Amino acid sequence: MTPQLAVHIVGQALMAAFWICAPLLVISFALGIVINLVQIATSMQDPVFSTVPRLAACVAGFLLFLPWMLKHAMSYAAAILGNLAQYAR
């Protein structure tokens, strides 16, 4: 295995991890901004008010995007395992 191939494989792994995590990160980021704006507007600094909706939204987003994330992870794994002979050289 050449160093360029190893860098390419690691790059693909990082991009796959990014795309698998991206929906949950976007949901959490957007909801965090909205909740922080509401907390600023109402001067309510209760940690439960900020934690519970974020957690519920992340769980709902995880359940909603789980088929897509599994499909993406399985296609990445199939691509890596399909070229395993090439990587062993």
Image: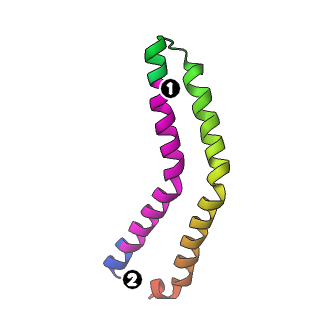
- Looking at the image, which residue is at 57% across and 33% down? 54
* Colouring scheme applied when the structure was drawn: rainbow
In the picture, which quadrant includes the C terminus?
A: bottom left
From the viewer's perspective, is residue 66 above or below residue 46?
below
Does 74 appear in magenta? Answer: no
Please identify the dominant SS of the magenta region: helix
SS class, disc 2? loop
Within 10 Å of the Cα at label 2, are there few (<14), some (14-19), or many (20+) other Cα atoms?
few
From the viewer's perspective, is residue 19 above or below residue 74?
above
Within 10 Å of the Cα at label 1, are there few (<14), some (14-19), or many (20+) other Cα atoms?
some
In this rendering, position of residue 1 left or right of residue 23 = left
Q: Nearer the viewer, residue 72 or 89?
A: 72
SS class, disc 1? helix
Number of numbered discs present?
Answer: 2
In this rendering, position of residue 84 left or right of residue 89 = right
Q: Residue furthest top?
A: 43
In this rendering, position of residue 67 left or right of residue 86 = right
- Looking at the image, which residue is at 49% across and 52% down? 22
Q: Which label belongs to residue 84?
A: none
Does 29 appear in magenta? Answer: yes
- Looking at the image, which residue is at 43% across and 69% down? 12
From the viewer's perspective, is residue 46 above or below residue 62?
above
Please tell me which of labels 2 and 1 falls first in the chain: 2
The alpha-carbon separation of the residues under discs 2 and 1 comes to: 49 Å
Dot 1 amino acid type? Ile
Dot 2 amino acid type? Met
Q: Give residue 36's position: percent from left, percent from top.
A: 46, 24
Residue highlighted by disc 2: 1
- Looking at the image, which residue is at 60% across and 29% down? 53
Residue highlighted by disc 1: 35
Magenta-colored span:
8-36
> Quadrant of residue 59 in the image?
top right
